[in-house]
Image (cartoon, helix red, strand yellow):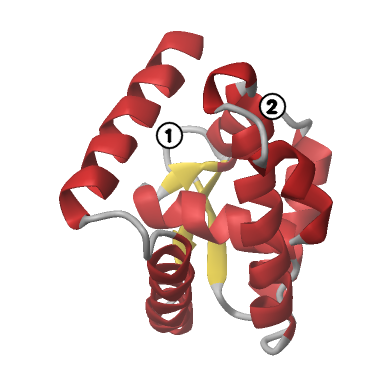
Amino acid sequence: MKEIDYLLKKDSSSIFLKDLINIINRSHSLYIYHEMKKYGISVSQYYFLVDLSYEDNIIQEEIAKRKKMNESSITRALKKLEDQELIQRTPDENNRRKNIVTFTEKGRKFMKKVKKIDMEWEKSATTLLSQKDKEKLKRRLKKVVEAIN
């Protein structure tokens, strides 16, 4: 990655954490773009599927809050996933104006592929880290996420 050589030459204490995270995120997004393209899935749809994999059977409005997006944008993205039969939206029995989003069987099977793809990327991105260091890094980054939320 020639475009980041200038950054890698610097002492790590002089580099902002956000810059490193941004480079990692862009690398992952590019990888996911190419992998998901094979299945007709966009990167943004990928992120909705991953979020749903952490908590299935979620109210659509909650997805909008978590993503900090308006509901109409969420509706369009979810409609595309629904058209591909990866998710389904059903009215909430307690409030018919709200939809509950769940995986279909096809969606669950597809997520197994997605998780495999993500594991491959993570493995290649962390080849220089021991498993112990990788887990420590995840715990520390999770603390950063907790602090900013």
- Residue 141 x %, y %: 39, 29
- Kindly identify which residue carries mark 1: 94
- Viewer-nearest residue: 118 or 77: 118
* Residue at image location 78% in from the left, 31% down from the top: 70
Q: Amino acid at mark 2?
A: Lys
Decide if residue 73 is on the left or right side of residue 94. right
Q: Earlier in the sequence, mark 1 or mark 2?
A: 2
Q: Nearer the viewer, mark 1 or mark 2?
A: 2
The answer to whether any part of residue 114 appears in the image is yes
- Residue 133 x %, y %: 24, 44
* Residue at image location 81% in from the left, 55% down from the top: 76
* Residue at image location 68% in from the left, 45% down from the top: 23
The answer to whether any part of residue 101 appears in the image is no
Residue neighbourhood size for the residue with mark 2, other residues' Cα within 10 Å, grouped as few (<14), some (14–19), many (≥20) = few
Numbered circle sitting on residue 120: none
Decide if residue 114 is on the left or right side of residue 119. right
Q: Amino acid at mark 1?
A: Asn
Q: Quadrant of residue 29?
A: bottom right
Numbered circle sitting on residue 68: 2
- Residue 67 x %, y %: 64, 34
CA gap, disc 1 and disc 2 = 24 Å
